[in-house]
């Protein structure tokens, strides 16, 4: 079985703006994470992204804009020796679309990633900047690591076996 590191997006791999990143022009990749992500990949981890994107339900941006951000992130990472093996996002927001199984802290996105990539959940991790990310990890049976907003991931590599 494969192992993976799931990454939350805003505040973990791109700059946190304090609210949703609604415009492509505001999407700023945290380049200080390249080396750490290459190391994780060299240790045999797939790199996956799992992100709540409730701004779609609110009508603040479209799935097309989100795809443009993710395509840019994927291309930038690839140019720096990092392959993102999958993007998982929840477009829902409880105030606009009701309850769903994918919005963190629910584990739906992580469970889908585990199934899609035949992952060993116990050997996999989810890194996020909110306690809801860790809650989702625990609910999915994977290891959760909470980081500070925009914290370099190299500072927590020792927590990943």
Image (cartoon, rainbow, N blue to C red):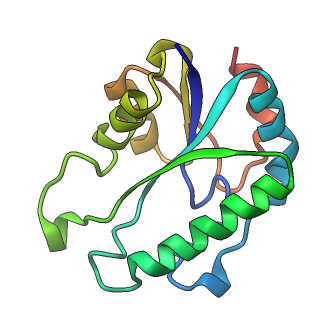
Task: From the top left corner, tell me how far across and down residue 122 is, in percent.
Answer: 48, 13
Task: From the top left corner, tell me how far across and down residue 58 is, in percent.
Answer: 28, 80
Q: Could you tell me how many numbered marks the image carries?
A: 0
Task: From the top left corner, tell me how far across and down residue 89 is, in percent.
Answer: 40, 56
Q: Closer to the camera, 20 or 78? A: 78
In the rendered view, does 28 fall on the left or right side of 137? right
Residue, x 31% and y 85% (percent of image)? 59
Q: Closer to the camera, 109 or 135? A: 109
Q: Closer to the camera, 79 or 10? A: 79
Q: Closer to the camera, 132 or 37? A: 37
- Answer with the quarter of the image where residue 105 lies: top left
In the rendered view, does 132 fall on the left or right side of 93? right
Q: Is residue 47 above or below residue 13?
A: above
Q: Is residue 117 above or below residue 17?
A: above
Residue, x 29% and y 40% (percent of image)? 108
Q: Is residue 155 above or below residue 86?
A: above
In the rendered view, does 140 fall on the left or right side of 95? right
Residue, x 48% and y 21% (percent of image)? 119
Q: Is residue 19 visible?
A: no
């Amino acid at each position: 079985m494969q192992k993976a590191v799931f990454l939350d997006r805003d505040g973990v791999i791109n700059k946190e703006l304090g609210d949703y990143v609604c415009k492509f022009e505001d999407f700023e990749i945290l380049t200080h994470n390249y080396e750490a992500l290459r190391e994780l990949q060299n240790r045999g981890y797939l790199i996956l992204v799992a992100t709540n994107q409730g701004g779609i339900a609110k009508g603040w941006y479209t799935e097309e804009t989100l795809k443009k951000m993710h395509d840019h992130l994927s291309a930038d990472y690839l140019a720096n020796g990092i392959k993102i093996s999958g993007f998982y996002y929840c477009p829902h927001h409880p105030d606009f679309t009701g309850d769903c199984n994918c919005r963190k802290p629910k584990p739906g996105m992580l469970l889908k990633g585990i199934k899609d990539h035949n992952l060993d959940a116990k050997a996999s991790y989810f890194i996020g900047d909110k306690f809801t990310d860790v809650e989702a990890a625990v609910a999915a049976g994977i290891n959760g690591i909470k980081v500070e907003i925009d914290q370099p991931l190299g500072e927590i590599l020792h927590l990943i076996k």
